Image (spheres, helix red, strand yellow):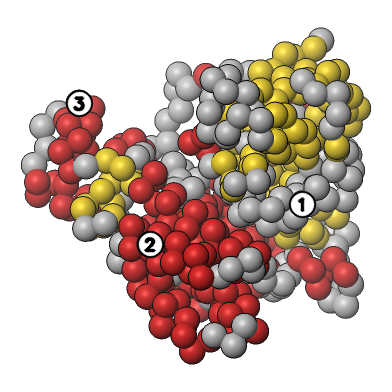
């Protein structure tokens, strides 16, 4: 797993400074091999041994703790037994044979791993299988019917209104005023009585024409720190003291205004890029491990775009490839995926963030500046974590693109292709990039090391993973 080699390398460098590289190089190889084979318990034992002999070296303890956390997260995502997955399948689609299950496994539609010598399925393997089967059945039949899907109906109506309001000006339109109450509840007794709990909650970005008038209404603790808007991840930080037998509650309420935006690409003259500019240099570069130019990514991008040198045309070809080939599916936690873009290519599926990582990687490789953007989708009754991006065209500026929303069912091509160069009013922008430092700095490996949407929690004894706390988003739409 190449993703984890950065941690291994860091640990090796630290140990080299202690004059112990030769003693530990074999240990690091053992960790790598055992992670590859799903020997989670063995990895944890090895890492515990490293921590015990590290003395007071905080750097070694931090990296070793990170490796241990990654290993512990794998069985949380892969916890379904063979008998249970068969029962889940039969409850939804009726009797299935072992041959059918094997066929779906061979196609990669039913995801599993070996975990400590036992075959375990991804928690969402069955629901993902249903989505993937439906995608391919509709694709084969030439169908993409969304009749009766209220979320799609609302989206279609709203984007039509956006287009009527823009008048080809690409200015933010149709502002929606929302009041948000966001709560993180840490489970009782996961932190010892009297110990300090540190919590970072998602907070809206301010430096965007589509997102304005952010006002804090109240917070569960009057002492808080809001990250500067220049931070990659916008956060509101608070602390609470753990009380035996009680949950620790972190809550904020705020209002903000979000607007839609659409660019009619046919009316924009795209100019040549200034390849020496800061924007071009920064946003056409790799950002490992998940914005990367591997051979597979290069080959795929080149096969889709050929000799095309028009940025909008290249982006469009790649965008349409996702529509035809990559269904949305529930994702593993990103922290246990070594290389997200290659995972999407190999498995031919991915959630919004996974698709966006691959889209960004391909466009940047082709010399087109593109940046990550994420937070939440906020339509009534369907709010959820969501990732998208913005593509930079010289002559137009930053154009929003939502690759996982794909095409809409409409004979009007502007409505059909809306999310190739537009975005709706129901968004909450929290991040303008990935893998940034939190503010104030977090001590331990984040539960989600790349994105920031749900929040992060830790105490002096370590990170508190997602299974140790719950989050809730409530939205009121203000007229």
Q: Residue at x 33, y 57 (%)?
A: 41
Q: Which mark is residue 441?
A: 1
Quote the CA–CA distance across marks 2 and 1.
29 Å
Q: Would residue 453 appear left or right of 126 to someone viewing this image?
A: right
- Asked whether residue 437 is in view, the answer is yes
Q: Secondary structure at mark 1?
A: loop
Discs 3/1, front: 1
Compare residues 58 and 43 and report the one nearer the observer: 58
Q: Position of residue 75 (x, y in %)?
A: 35, 48
Compare residues 435 and 236 and report the one nearer the observer: 236
- Earlier-in-chain disc, 2 versus 1: 2
Mark 2 residue crowding within 10 angstroms, few (<14) / some (14–19) / many (20+): few
Quote the CA–CA distance across marks 3 and 2.
39 Å
Label 3: which residue?
91
Q: Position of residue 376 (x, y in %)?
A: 66, 34
Q: Position of residue 439 (x, y in %)?
A: 80, 47
Q: Residue furthest top?
A: 479
Mark 1 residue crowding within 10 angstroms, few (<14) / some (14–19) / many (20+): few
Mark 3 residue crowding within 10 angstroms, few (<14) / some (14–19) / many (20+): few
Q: Would residue 335 appear left or right of 383 to someone viewing this image?
A: left
- Asked whether residue 208 is in view, the answer is no
* Image height of 107 relative to 227, above or below: below
Q: Residue at x 47, y 58 (%)?
A: 68
* Image height of 111 relative to 181, above or below: below
Q: Secondary structure at mark 3?
A: helix
**Which quadrant of the rendered structure holds the C terminus?**
top right
Label 2: which residue?
45
């Amino acid at each position: 797993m190449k993703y984890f080699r950065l941690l291994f390398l860091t640990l090796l460098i630290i140990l080299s400074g202690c004059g112990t590289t030769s003693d530990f190089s074999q240990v690091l190889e053992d960790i790598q091999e055992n992670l590859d084979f799903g020997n989670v318990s063995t990895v944890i034992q090895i890492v515990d041994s490293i921590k015990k002999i590290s003395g007071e070296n905080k750097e070694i303890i931090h990296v070793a703790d990170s490796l241990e956390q990654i290993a512990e997260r794998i069985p949380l995502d892969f916890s379904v037994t063979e008998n249970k997955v068969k029962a889940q399948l039969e409850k939804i689609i009726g009797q299935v044979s072992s041959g059918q299950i094997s066929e779906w496994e061979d196609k990669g539609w039913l995801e599993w791993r070996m975990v400590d010598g036992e075959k375990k399925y991804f928690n969402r393997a069955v629901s993902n299988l249903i989505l993937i089967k439906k995608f391919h059945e509709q694709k084969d039949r030439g169908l993409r019917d969304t009749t009766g899907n209220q979320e799609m109906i609302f989206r279609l109506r709203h984007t039509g209104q956006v287009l009527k309001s823009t008048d080809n000006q690409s200015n933010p339109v149709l502002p929606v005023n929302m009041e948000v109450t966001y709560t993180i509840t840490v489970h009782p007794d996961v932190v010892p009585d009297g110990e300090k709990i540190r919590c970072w909650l998602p907070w809206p970005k301010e430096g965007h024409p589509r997102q304005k008038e952010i006002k804090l209404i109240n917070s569960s603790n009057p002492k808080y720190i809001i990250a500067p808007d220049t931070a990659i991840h916008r956060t509101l930080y608070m602390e609470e003291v753990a009380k035996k037998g009680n949950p620790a509650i972190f809550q904020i309420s705020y209002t903000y205004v979000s607007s839609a935006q659409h660019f009619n690409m046919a009316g924009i003259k795209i100019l040549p890029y200034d390849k020496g500019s800061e924007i071009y240099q920064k946003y056409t570069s790799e950002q490992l491990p998940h914005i990367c130019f591997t051979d597979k990514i290069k080959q795929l991008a080149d096969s889709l775009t050929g000799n095309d040198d028009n940025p909008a045309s290249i982006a469009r070809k790649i965008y349409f490839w996702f529509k035809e080939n990559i269904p949305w599916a529930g994702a593993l936690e990103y922290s246990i995926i070594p290389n997200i873009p290659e995972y999407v290519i190999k498995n031919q599926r991915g959630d919004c963030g996974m698709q966006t990582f691959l889209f960004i990687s391909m466009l940047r490789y082709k010399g087109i500046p593109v940046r990550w953007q994420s937070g939440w989708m906020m339509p009534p009754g369907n709010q959820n974590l969501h990732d998208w991006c913005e593509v930079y065209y010289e002559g137009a500026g930053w154009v929003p693109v939502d690759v996982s929303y794909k095409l809409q069912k409409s004979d009007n091509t502007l409505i059909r292709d809306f999310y190739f160069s537009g975005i709706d009013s129901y968004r909450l922008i929290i991040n303008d990039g990935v893998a940034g430092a939190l503010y104030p700095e977090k001590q331990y490996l984040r539960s989600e090391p790349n994105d920031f949407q749900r929040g992060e929690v830790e105490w002096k004894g370590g990170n508190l993973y997602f299974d140790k706390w719950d989050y809730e988003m409530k939205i009121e739409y203000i007229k």
